[in-house]
Image (spheres, grey):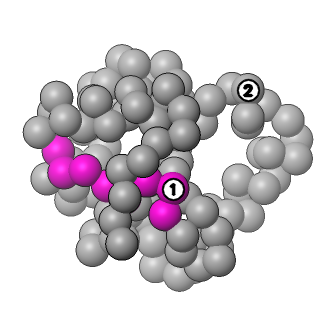
Amino acid sequence: MATTLTRSPLEDAFLALLKRAGLPMPETNAHIEGMEVDTLWRKRRVVAELDGWDAHHTRHAFERDRTRDATLTAAGYQVVRFTHRQVLDGGHVTETLRRLGIR
């Protein structure tokens, strides 16, 4: 079942950006391939991970994220990562998503 429940201000900002840009809403905190992803457009097989500095600035987080991305890519998902600043600026995020077929 699709959900748009969020767990962080960054996720809230991301969904607000999508709404302003007229892009479809993803599932949030969805489960695929045995892991939870921040956002998922299931039919398009696109995952967007939202990377705030607090949770992603350690070597362990860096390694974990690369393993997750490789697992999802091997399963046929396109994975993109956006930083907090990119979400707030918006243009790069919306353009990238449109190029991935999110319309």
Q: Secondary structure at mark 2?
A: helix
Q: Position of residue 23 (x, y in %)?
A: 17, 45
Residue found farthest to the right: 59
Residue at the image point whose x is 31% and y is 43% from the top:
96
Q: Amino acid at mark 2?
A: Asp
Q: Secondary structure at mark 1?
A: strand
In the image, is residue 4 part of the stretch drawn in magenta?
no
Disc number placed over residue 8 in the picture, else none:
none
- Provide the residue designation for mark 1: 29
In the rendered image, the vertical position of residue 55 relative to residue 39, given as above or below: above
Q: Which residues are magenta?
A: 23-30
Q: Position of residue 70 (x, y in %)?
A: 64, 68
Disc number placed over residue 54 in the picture, else none:
2
Kindly indicate the quadrant of the structure image that contains residue 3. bottom left
Residue at the image point whose x is 36% and y is 72% from the top:
1
In the image, is residue 28 part of the stretch drawn in magenta?
yes
**How many neighbours does mark 1 have within 10 angstroms: few (below 14), some (14-19), or many (20 or more)?**
many
Q: Amino acid at mark 1?
A: Asn
**How many neighbours does mark 2 have within 10 angstroms: few (below 14), some (14-19), or many (20 or more)?**
few
In the rendered image, the vertical position of residue 19 relative to residue 30, given as above or below: above
Is residue 52 something that shows in the picture? yes
